[in-house]
Image (spheres, rainbow, N blue to C red):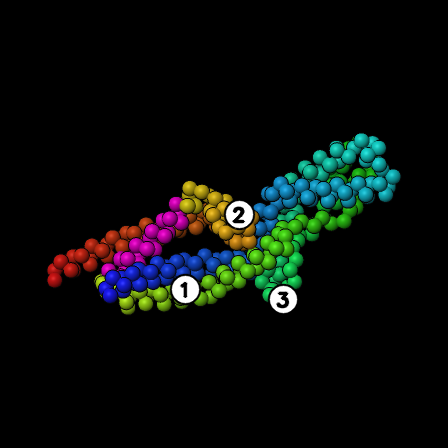
Amino acid sequence: MKLLRTIISALCILVGALSIVGWAISSVAVRAVEDGTAVVTITERALDSEAVQSRIADAMTGEVGDWLAGRGVDLQGLRLSDVVGNLLRNVAGSDAFKTLVADQAEAARQQIAEALTDDSRAAAPLVVVVDVDSLVADQLNGVAVLGSVASAVDIAPVEVVVMDADTFERARTAYHVMELAAQYGLWMGIGLVVVGLLVSPRRAWFLPKLLLAIGVMAMVAWGLVRALGTDGVLALLPGGRDGALGTVVGGVLTDEASASLTQRTLWVGLGGLAGAAVLALVVRALQGRR
C-alpha cells in the first residue's frame, strides 16, 4: 500500500508540474494570438518557405503577363518571359516584400486573430492580401524594352496563403486546447500537487520532490532550446515545424521570446534543483535528530 501511495504521489507531482508549465506556456501563446503578435510572426515564417515564394512569384508573373499583353506587349515574342519571371521571383523573396506583407498582417491582425478563434468560421485558408504594384514597377523599370509602360503597372493584389485550410483548422483546434490549458492548467496543476501531498507516505520529502521535478523539467526544456534552437524544438512537435501546433507555437516563439524563455527556464531549473537540494538536507537533518 505504501508503494502504491508513493507511485500515485510521484505521478501527481509530475503531471501537476507539467500542467503548471503547460499553463504558463499556453497563457503566453493565447495572449500572443489575441493581441495579434503571433499572427505577424506566423506570416513572416510562412514567407521563408521557398514553396510559398514560388507560388507568389508564379501568381505575379501571370498577372503581369496578362496586364502587359493587354497593352500590346508580348513577353514571349520579345523573349522576356524568363527575364520578367526571374525579376518577380526576386520580388517574392525580397526583404521589401516580406516587410510589405508583415505590415499588412499587422494592419489586419485583429481580424486574423478573430478568424483563428471564431468557432463559427467556415473552413478556409489564412490569406493575407497585398498590393505589390510599386515593387513590381521598380523591378520592371530595369527592363529597358518595356519603357514607360512598366512604371504604370496595375495588377490585382497578391494573395499570400499563410496557412492552407486544413492546417488552419488544426491550428484553431490547437489554439482551443491552449486556451483550455491557459484557463484551467494552473488550477489542475495545483489540485494534483495537493493530491500528491495528501497521499504521499513521506510528506516531509514532498516539497524537495516537487522542486526536483520542476527543476529537472526546466533544465530539460533549457537544454532542448539551447541544443536544437527554436526550429529544432518546433520539429519535435506533432506535425513538425509546419504542422498546426508548430505553426501556432512558432508564432509565439520569436527569437526575442525564445532567448527570454531560455534564460527563464535556466533560472527556474537551477532554482528548483538548488531548492530541492537545500530542502533535502534540511529534511535529512531534522530526521536525524529524531
- Residue at 42% from the left image edge and 42% from the top image edge: 227
Q: Quadrant of the N terminus?
A: bottom left
Name the residue nearer the viewer: 125 or 207. Answer: 125
Q: Is residue 111 above or below residue 55?
A: below
Q: Mark 2 is on which residue type?
A: Arg
Left or right of 288 in this view: 45: right
Left or right of 60 in this view: 247: left
**How far is mark 1 from mark 2, CA to CA?**
27 Å
Q: Mark 3 is on which residue type?
A: Ser
Q: Which of marks 3 and 1 is nearer the N terminus?
A: 3
Q: Residue 120 carries which label?
A: 3
- Residue at 43% from the left image edge and 58% from the top image edge: 22
Magenta highlight range: 205-223
Q: Mark 1 is on which residue type?
A: Leu
Residue 230 in sight in this render = no
Q: Is residue 198 above or below residue 217?
A: below
Q: Is residue 279 above or below residue 72?
A: below
Circle 2 is placed at which residue position? Answer: 241
**How far is mark 2 from mark 3, CA to CA?**
27 Å
Q: Earlier in the sequence, mark 2 or mark 3?
A: 3
Whether the residues at callouts 2 and 3 have beta carbons within 8 Å, the answer is no
What secondary structure is the stretch in magenta mostly built from? Answer: helix
Q: Which of marks 1 and 2 is in front?
A: 2
Q: Which mark is residue 186?
A: 1
